[in-house]
Amino acid sequence: MTGRDTGVRHGSPQSGGRRWVGAAVPRREDPRLLRGRGRFIDDVQLSGMLHAGFVRSTVAHGRILDIDLSAVRAVEGVVAAYTAEDLDLGDIVALLDRPPEEFAPTAMPVLAKEKVRFVGEPVAVVIARDPYSVEDGIEAAAVTFEPIGAIVSEETAFAADAPLVHEEAPGNVLLDVSMFDTPGVDTAFEAAESGPGCVVEVVTRSGRQNALPLETRGVVASWDDRDDQLLVQTCTQVPHQVRTVLARSLRVPERTVRVTVPDMGGGFGQKCVVGREEIAVAAAARKLDRPVKWIEDRREALTAAFLAREQRYRTRAAFDAEGRITALDVDVVCDMGAYSCYPFTAGIEPLMASAEMPSVYRVPAYRVRGRAITSNKAPTAPYRGVSRPQYVMAMERVMERAARELGIDPVEIRRRNVITEFPYTGVNGVTYDPGTYRESLDLAEAALREEGWYEFRERAAAEGRHIGIGYCCFSERTGYGSDAFAKRKMQVVPGFDVSEIRMDTTGAVVVTSGTMNHGQSHETTLAQIAADRLGLELDKVKLRQGDTERIAYGWGTFASRSVTIGGSAVSVAAGRLGELLCTIAAHLLKTRPDNVRLDGDGGVVQIDDPSRRVPFEDIAEVAYLRSHLLPKGVEPTLTATASFDVAGDGTFSNATHAVVVEADPGTGRIGILRYACVEDCGVVIHPQVVDGQCRGGIAQGIAGALFEEVTYADNGEPSAASFIDYLVPTATEIPDITVTHLETPCAFTESGAKGAGEGGTIGAPAAVLNAINDALRHTGVELDTTPVHPQTVLAALDAAREQPVRA
């Protein structure tokens, strides 16, 4: 399905089609940011401001025998140093409403108390007049630990004599859920094993990664006793959740805490959970009655910030002789690190994978077990894609393996299995709304064939070169509403968003949104939605976000919810304001309310006499300055508020990625020669922004496929403390990426848009891995783990030389 939906939603009085949605207008954020006029957290300077830093654990797992800060307090410039006992803060606790045999709740102290659970865990906070004195103070701290054996892998976590990371988590398991075991699984496997079909089993693994936003975490907290309020300025994706947890931890009324967010240099999910450092800094500011700033350095960001991705999938799939999947049996283990993150808990990754594992394919029978284990590593938070890059990679490797076993072309086997009739309710109980799964696959393949890459691959093979072609066909569930999150049994259930729109006397509007921009151009895209709904010029719309006092409530930005839910709330609020404007205009024109409409040009026109119209500024003047002329019962204000939630299972964007790589058997290096993305995120609000989301996401996906990984020594020491050890791709390693848009309008959102924030990252690891395996198809090598480093390729080639080459 293609083409844009141009209908007006929810009875808007505007009759014309959109003017702004779909246009690549100049992004409103760019002039400020590109000229260095942005205001980020480290730009905040307050009179009398102090600086904070953290004494962090040097052992991965151990009991705290003593914390001696006497030498710290003697350091010149140090103002204070606090332990957990000094601050007496409540713990951060994320909960699921599940029985004890399924979920083990654990508490994350703001500062470690009796025990430390990963290298880098904060045990004390040092406050000084300048950052240099902070570092001197940290070095003066004397902390004595009694080391305990470290849990650094699935094998060590499940070992019979393994020490427990948390006493309340037996077997080091935080979550153990078998969400689906539908009838027919065993029968399907028996039939495939004894009949003409096949059974394939693939074990896939993904390395631990850092979301790596350009701007590290940071906070500036200040206490104002005149207002009896703690102002916390921080770079977070979820300001209202920070306010709630901070107030509870400090044991103060929520009204006494205000959280604001300046410009933010990326988040990617790492900043959509509540961190302990911002709470400790806020507590110190309140205790000292002085502003306090903490800016995370890059070493802390790499070792102590929230990480992601480390997962293992054992996937068995049964296929019939025609290559159609008949059953799926999956075991998922996600290493969640030392603590559950708030509010999503340690269940965020295994629950996501279990619920959505079938991906874009028709799976008649399904069994899955999902486990979250705890380990002595920095805790896990959602990172762009949240398990979908991993379960998509597992499914796509299954498709590749079955295609080989059955002698079917890899693209053809996908065609035989993708969902083509909508709406489709899967074996997982999820209903998929209309998409272009088959169409995107066909277009991606056609692009590579028409460009001659298949012929190039064969010519190169004759020359001894290793060229491979790989695909990934997937969906991206977006617009998770309260119903979808409630199915996970989270005690805190995200979902809705709230928007207020207010017109001033000039006819311009200020729009608030509970979403939080950290690079997605909300100031432009949400303004486009509001301007279209009201028929305003774009420069007459101003967006406000990131202030818990100005925005009633909001769940922030994650899971591609900003346009789908936040944008829909903006649209509904604008529609309600439009109705109010029409009511007042009808009264001024002395006609019926049903005889007027927004004229799409900043005013209201009389339908049966288009020569009669009232500009918005005239309506606003009456509403505010001459309110005695308002119709009876209409209040003297031009404000409208709306909330929006998506019922049911949300909406699904989809895409196919097609990749051509070359593997160098001498060096093990993988070079990407071609990358094509065909995506469908519904109605495209701003093509340039969506292109940027796709390309940026693909770059992060390539990073996970080929470069980025945090590993740990047996004692729990992390390998990557700088960019010397944590390999980040540069522009040299990221290829040109073509993006082709399909548009299947969403019926559940106001604009017809679906989310676009995570798709690039979801598809890239599987597409690149499949291309690598195709490049090495004649060597006997098959790789199912990411990242694929050059040394990985060389080791696999060496091992394969000792084995018979597979035909």
Image (cartoon, helix red, strand yellow):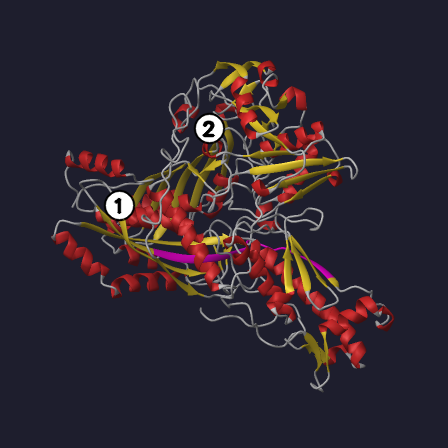
Residue 184 in sight from this viewpoint: no
Q: Residues within 10 Å of mark 2 (few under 14, many from 20)?
A: many
72 in the magenta segment = no
Nearest to the observer: residue 188 or residue 329: 329
Q: CA distance from mark 2 to mark 1?
A: 29 Å
| Three-letter residue code for mark 2 | Lys
Magenta segment main secondary structure: strand
Query: Mark 2 — residue?
Result: 377
| Whether residue 805 is visible | yes
Numbered range of the magenta stretch? 640-657
Give the label on residue 670, or none. Answer: 1
Q: Earlier in the sequence, mark 2 or mark 1?
A: 2
Q: Secondary structure at mark 2?
A: loop
Q: In the figure, residue 242 lies in which quadrant? A: top right
Give the crowd class for mark 1: few <14, some 14-19, many >=20 residues within 10 Å.
Answer: many
Q: Is residue 228 above or below residue 746?
A: above
Residue that appears at 39% across and 47% down: 701
x and y, in percent, of residue 468 in the image: 24, 51
